[in-house]
Amino acid sequence: MAARTRLTALAVERAHRSGKAVLLSDGDGLYLRKQTRDGASWTLRYRFAGKEHWLTLGNYPDMALAQARIEARQARVLLDRQQNPLSVRRAALDEERRKGSFKALCEDWYRTEVQARGLKHPGVPRRYLDKYLVPKLGRMAASEVTPADVVRLLDGLKGRAPTAANDLLRFTRRIFAFGVRRRLVTSNPAADFSPRLDAGGTERPRSRALSFDEIAQLFESIRETPNFGQDNLLAIKLLLALCVRKGELLGARWEEFDLDGSTQAGAVWHLPASRTKTSEGLDIPLTPAVVDWLNTLRALGAGSEYIFPKRRRDPRERVPHMGIDTLNVALGRVKHGLPHFTLHDLRRTARTHLAALGVRREVAERCLGHKLRGVEGTYDRHDYFKERRAALTRWTQMLLDAERGVSKVVAINTGTA
């Protein structure tokens, strides 16, 4: 009798990246089931009381092949005991709802208030749930969470990330307000808290922008940082050169890019409306240097559909590409000696230098993907593509000079771009 062929981790990963619908058997009823472009799940097929059932064990890559086999084995043990695994799971969920855990309240709120309403960026609240709320308070009964628990939650964050602390407070208040409306809890322990007094404080518009010399020093410090990673460096350079938001860049797929310049527009990134803050698509011109950087990333990506692939399995991370905090962590290891700045400050840096290069205001604003305001925005529907290409070409050359340590040449404001 021929030996049964089982799946391998490599075969699973290839099937997940293929983008095609698949149903791969690992034997004993365990399948990798992929029905959508991004979604793959482990499913156990079994019969109970004469009926066929499909039990979803978990999602890939959050659940690896080895763990899926363990979960499937545990389900088969229940079958040996004449218990339906699906019924056992439903009973456990009902018990969790009966106990009213804070984790259950969070998940109920997320399904009802975030997923069901089709919010544009569901990954943001999901990140706060997985990183802060569920690990810290998830096992507690929702009705037993006190203002003192909320204080401890915020105190652990507000000193090092005040803006995140404010967002965390807002999500906590919304979750408990949802629970009060649904009669799942009787009060909101975060109701009397304010960002100014209890979280990160009043948020003021940031003004930090890196000078030419600071950009040069940053590049030099990155080169001197062991194991910073070529893909991390290219991400920093692309954030500067393309003037985009971090989430827009990390979520980019290769299908959005025309690196060969097959049209008269030349090389371009078609950033879809579904991933922009303004809900409007944007064609971003790509300079030759940027195209070279992207081609390097394509070689590093080894066939991934994302320009920045997911690097490792993290059960808390729900994005299928590089984690949203990965660059922050990498940059935090760089001893650059510069006054504090954030990755989002790189957009302000780009905008500041575009102005210094003499780029017209409306062109610079469109380089950042901003809508023109007021009457001007209503009547001026020109996308300034050619002007943006010229502006970004000059700005990218300035970045290349900074990386090479070339002395800055003061631009003359000609008003042509």
Image (tube, rainbow, N blue to C red):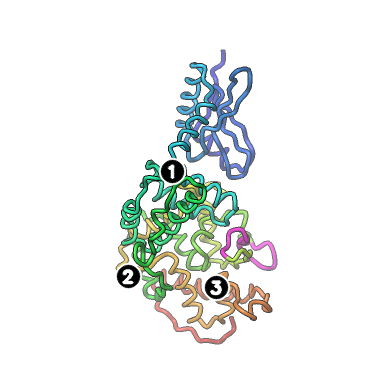
Q: In front of the other: label 1 or label 3?
A: 1
- Asked if residue 261 lies left or right of residue 352, the reply is right
Image coords of residue 186 (percent x, y) = 44, 49
Badge 3 crowding class, 10 Å Cα cut-off, few under 14, some 14 to 19, many 20 or more, is some
Type of amino acid under label 3? Thr
Q: Quick check: can you spot residue 209?
A: no
Q: In which quarter of the image is residue 280?
A: bottom right
Quadrant that contains the C terminus: bottom right
Tell me the magenta residue range. Answer: 261-277
Q: Which mark is residue 338?
A: 2
Q: Which of 45 and 410 is in front in this view?
A: 45
Badge 1 crowding class, 10 Å Cα cut-off, few under 14, some 14 to 19, many 20 or more, is many
Which residue was labeled with disc 1?
Answer: 103
Q: Quick check: can you spot residue 216?
A: yes
Image coords of residue 79 (percent x, y) = 52, 19
Q: In front of the other: label 1 or label 2?
A: 1
Mark 1, secondary structure of its residue: helix
Identified at 57% across, 55% down, the residue is 119
Q: How far apart are marks 1 and 2 (CA)?
A: 40 Å
Image coords of residue 335 (percent x, y) = 30, 63
Give the mark, 1 or 3, whose residue is nearer the N terminus. Answer: 1
Q: Quadrant of residue 143?
A: top left
- Asked if residue 340 lies left or right of residue 177, the reply is left
Quadrant that contains the N terminus: top right
Q: Which mark is residue 393?
A: 3
Identified at 53% across, 35% down, the residue is 12
Give the mark, 2 or 3, whose residue is nearer the N terminus. Answer: 2
